[in-house]
Image (tube, grey):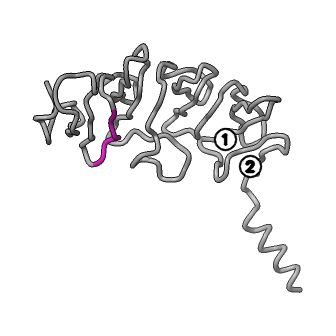
């Protein structure tokens, strides 16, 4: 009788729920699940792994062409292409923010363990190639617009409307940090801003 009650209880809680299937020949990073109906998964090749996205039925929706891929958030996912550059795609696999960034700070102050890229205070720290003349960090919004120019040696993501900035060491003047607001205006330590 106890077994029958357990089976009925199990059926009650699972009926009506669609199964989310990750086929056995695919792998996912620890803790990664389905967001917006898709999950980032990878296949191993001889030398490395390639990532793509599957739907809840296990069908490949976005092909295995990425070096790295995060879960979807607000209709976009951060992915890294074969040239080691980062960009964003939508749930159909269309590029919505071009692959022009060498690095993205998605895990400092804004990564809450859900494997998604967030835009703290609406902005995300990104680094562009500067012909190897030094780091070129700045901030973009969710439309991919560069709100704070990519010209700084280092930055932290925004926390409560402020971000820490370190000027390029090649610039004249101090390299001590200063803080900006989401409009790019200096709000603290401005003697170190140099502009």
Of helix, strand and loop, which one carries label 2? loop
Calculate the distance from the C-alpha at mark 1 to the C-alpha at mark 2: 10 Å
Task: Look at 35% across and 22% down and name the residue there.
Answer: 145
Query: Which residue corresponds to mark 1?
Result: 39
Task: Look at 80% across and 30% down and name the residue there.
Answer: 45
Q: Nearer the viewer, residue 174 or 166?
A: 174
Task: Look at 66% across and 41% down and name the residue there.
Answer: 39
Query: Which residue corresponds to mark 2?
Result: 20
Q: Nearer the viewer, residue 121 or 167?
A: 167
Q: Along the polypeptide, which appears first: circle 1 or circle 2?
A: 2
Label drawn at residue 134: none
Task: Look at 46% across and 44% down and name the residue there.
Answer: 107
Quadrant of residue 54 in the image? top right
Q: Main secondary structure of the magenta part?
A: loop
Q: Is residue 102 magenta?
A: no
Q: Are the two marked residues, 1 and 2, in contact with CB atoms closer than 8 angstroms?
A: yes
Q: Is residue 68 above or below residue 23?
A: above
Provide residue 71's location: percent of width, then percent of height.
58, 40
Provide residue 168's location: percent of width, then percent of height.
28, 26
Q: Nearer the viewer, residue 6 or 165?
A: 165
Q: Is residue 63 above or below residue 15?
A: above
Q: Which residues are magenta?
A: 154-159
Quadrant assignment for the N terminus? bottom right
Of helix, strand and loop, which one carries label 1? strand
Q: Residue furthest left?
A: 191
Relative side of 28 to 99, left or right: right
Quadrant of residue 124 in the image? top left
Quadrant assignment for the C terminus? top left
């Amino acid at each position: 009788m106890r077994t029958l009650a357990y089976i009925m209880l199990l059926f009650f809680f699972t009926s009506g729920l669609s199964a989310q299937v990750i086929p056995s020949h695919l792998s996912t990073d620890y803790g990664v699940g389905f967001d917006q109906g898709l999950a980032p998964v990878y296949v191993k090749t001889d030398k490395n792994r390639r990532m793509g996205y599957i739907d809840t039925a296990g069908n490949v929706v976005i092909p295995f062409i990425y070096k790295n891929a995060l879960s979807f958030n607000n209709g976009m996912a951060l992915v890294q292409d074969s040239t080691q550059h980062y960009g964003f795609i939508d749930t159909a696999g269309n590029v919505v923010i071009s692959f022009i960034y060498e690095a993205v700070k998605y895990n400092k102050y804004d990564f809450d363990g859900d494997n998604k890229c967030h835009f703290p205070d609406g902005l995300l720290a990104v680094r562009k190639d500067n012909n190897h003349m030094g780091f070129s960090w700045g901030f973009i919004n969710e439309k991919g617009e560069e709100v704070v120019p990519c010209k700084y040696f280092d930055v932290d993501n925004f926390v409560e409307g402020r971000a820490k900035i370190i000027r390029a060491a090649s610039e004249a003047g101090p390299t001590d940090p200063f803080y900006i607001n989401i409009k790019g205006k200096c709000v603290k330590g401005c003697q170190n801003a140099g502009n």
